[in-house]
Image (tube, rainbow, N blue to C red):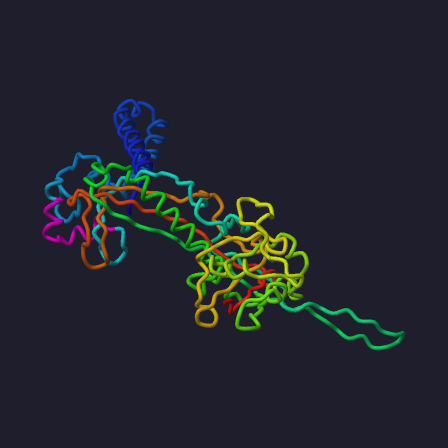
Amino acid sequence: MEFTKEQFDELQKVKALYEKELADKEVAKKDAIEMDRFEKMKADIIAKIAPVQKRLEFVAGEPKERKEGTDYCKSFGEFLHMVKTNDIRLKTAMSTTSGQGGYTIPQEWSKDILNEMNNFATAPQKCTVMNMSAPTLHINSLLTDLTVAWSTEATDKSTTKPTFSQADLTLRYLYAIITMTKELSADSLIDMSAFLKNLVAQNIALELEAQILQANAAPFTGILNAVGVNAVAQVAGNLSYSDITAVVNNTGQLEQYKKNAVWYMTRGALNLVMNLKDLQNRPLFNMNNPVIDGSLPMILNYPVNISDQITDTLSAAGSTSIVFGDLKNVWIGKKAGDPDAIDVLWTNTAIISSSTSVTENLFLANKEALRFELRRGILVAIPAAFVKLTGVK
């Protein structure tokens, strides 16, 4: 079992209380009622301390004489010897991996919060955030509607019923673990820790955008692969004005979903659109249109967003796809109470290991590790709110 510094401090307080009660034992004996209270408190404290007694003796820096059959170390030197000789006690008593042993030594972690992730991608902040009380949220959606009918007097009435489907919004960890030498961190002309934080934030934001727009069950399913998204295929060999209007006027997408819709496309697709003209020979892409929320000018009165997370693997070779719709109909799940930003953990005392062998001992190698993680779920909650144009070239 591993403990944070805060948990360890609490255990030390309990231990101090235990020692104080022992010092007052003689006074408590004078009163039978007080003695009963003392014994009960003593038993409660011992019960709390017992499961972590070995860890307290090692971490506190005051190791006691090791009795026969126990697994903790008498000294830090003995611990280092265990590391060198692959002592079996290191695999068991010092492990956090049940059944496998592992090689994790007691760690002290510090936490930091990073709030820069939305500077690198535009899709995540356009989605609807769902606070979840459990790891999975089950969502029922309408698959087919019911029907209403007219009848004449004294005739049999037909029955009708809607059908439903179920979708699950499940949380997953998105993470990165980076190790570096203390010398690199200390001697670099730039703040290496800050640089890595921003680099990870950028990649996490882009990965979220890729999951929202295109992922195919890895681990989520994005708009371009979601079942139920309205699909329009480019008609001719080259993108035309009629292809764009077919997307905007798609009858499968209800009017309510067109109200706040936006375009998502690659820079290459935008280049094709910029060369289009309407039926009156007017450029479809008007550079004089106002810029909205930092996005590019609009196409047919809908803002354009550029994303390189859309690839050409979904349709004909050498082509790409375009997404049209309101991203509020994509849900991003987060556990209620979890931070909104990336969680950053730092250590220089961990041993990063597999289930069978040591791969890196940060303490002995004079290294440090940063672990970045974000727990999120992604679900295209209403696929019919979107239209995709495929085979764009």
Q: Nearer the viewer, residue 302 or 211?
A: 302
The question of residue 358 being in magenta is answered with: no
- Left or right position of 234 against 205: right
Q: Nearer the viewer, residue 90 or 326?
A: 326
Q: Nearer the viewer, residue 334 or 153?
A: 334
**What residue lies at 53% left-to-right and 44% top-to-bottom?**
294
- From this viewpoint, which residue is outermost toward the right? 153
- Left or right position of 375 against 130: left
**What residue lies at 56% left-to-right and 70% top-to-bottom?**
233
Q: Position of residue 191 (x, y in %)?
A: 29, 37
Q: Position of residue 303 (x, y in %)?
A: 58, 52
Q: Nearer the viewer, residue 45 or 291?
A: 291
- Left or right position of 293 against 354: right
Q: Position of residue 256 (x, y in %)?
A: 67, 56
- Left or right position of 94 against 387: left
What residue span does the magenta drawing correspond to? 79-95
**What residue lies at 53% left-to-right and 48% top-to-bottom?**
295
- From this viewpoint, which residue is outermost toward the front? 281
Q: Position of residue 130 (x, y in %)?
A: 53, 50
Q: Above or below — where is 284 with respect to 350?
A: below
Q: Above or below — where is 295 with respect to 191?
A: below
Main SS of the magenta segment?
helix
- Numbered-mark total: 0
- From this viewpoint, which residue is outermost toward the bottom? 155
